[in-house]
Amino acid sequence: MTNPITPFRLAEIEERCEAATYGPWYAINIVVGDGGSRTGIYSNRNASNSIAYCFRFSDDIVPNASFIAHARQDLPDCHAEIKRLQDRIAEIGLERDIALGELEAK
C-alpha cells in the first residue's frame, strides 16, 4: 500500500530531487581488473562521475541499477504531473462551487 502524496510529502520529494546530482543518470556495467564487473550509476555516459555502485552479484543488478538511474528523471516528471493534477482538481472544485452557487441563486 502506498502512502498518500500530501502537499508536505510532495515538497519533501521535490527537495530531494533538487538536492540530487543533476541528471540524467546512466547505469553502466564496467569490467574491473580482476575480470569481474560492477554496475554503477553515473552522471555522464563515459562513467567518469560516479553517483553510486551496485555490488550485488545477481541477475537483478542491471534492472535495479537502471531503476535507480531512471529515477533521476522519472521522479521530477512524476512530481510535476502530481502537482498539475492537484492544481486541476482544485480548479474543478472551484468551478463546481461557482456552478452550485449560480444554481442556488436561481
Image (spheres, rainbow, N blue to C red):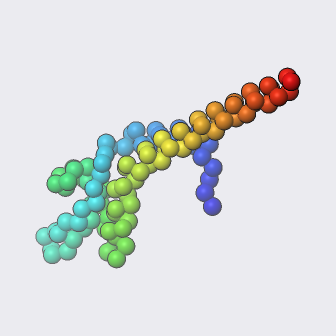
Q: Residue furthest front?
A: 106
Across and down, in percent, residue 57 comes to: 32, 75
Across and down, in percent, residue 58 comes to: 34, 76
Q: Residue at x 40, y 53 (%)?
A: 71
Q: Residue furthest top?
A: 105
Report whether residue 52 is seen.
yes
- Which corner quadrant of the image does residue 37 belong to? bottom left
Q: Quadrant of the N terminus?
A: bottom right
Q: Note whether 78 is above or below 1 in the view shown.
A: above
Q: Quadrant of the C terminus?
A: top right
Q: How many marks?
A: 0
Q: Residue at x 38, y 65 (%)?
A: 64
- In the image, taking residue 53 as reference, residue 6 lies left or right, namely right
Q: Residue at x 28, y 60 (%)?
A: 27
- In the image, taking residue 6 as reference, residue 66 lies left or right, namely left
Across and down, in percent, residue 83 comes to: 54, 39
Q: Residue at x 69, y 30 (%)?
A: 94
Report whether residue 7 is seen.
no
Across and down, in percent, residue 15 comes to: 46, 38
Q: Please tell me which residue lies in front, 17 or 84.
A: 84
Q: Please tell me which residue lies in front, 50 or 29.
A: 29
- In the image, taking residue 87 as reference, residue 17 lies left or right, namely left
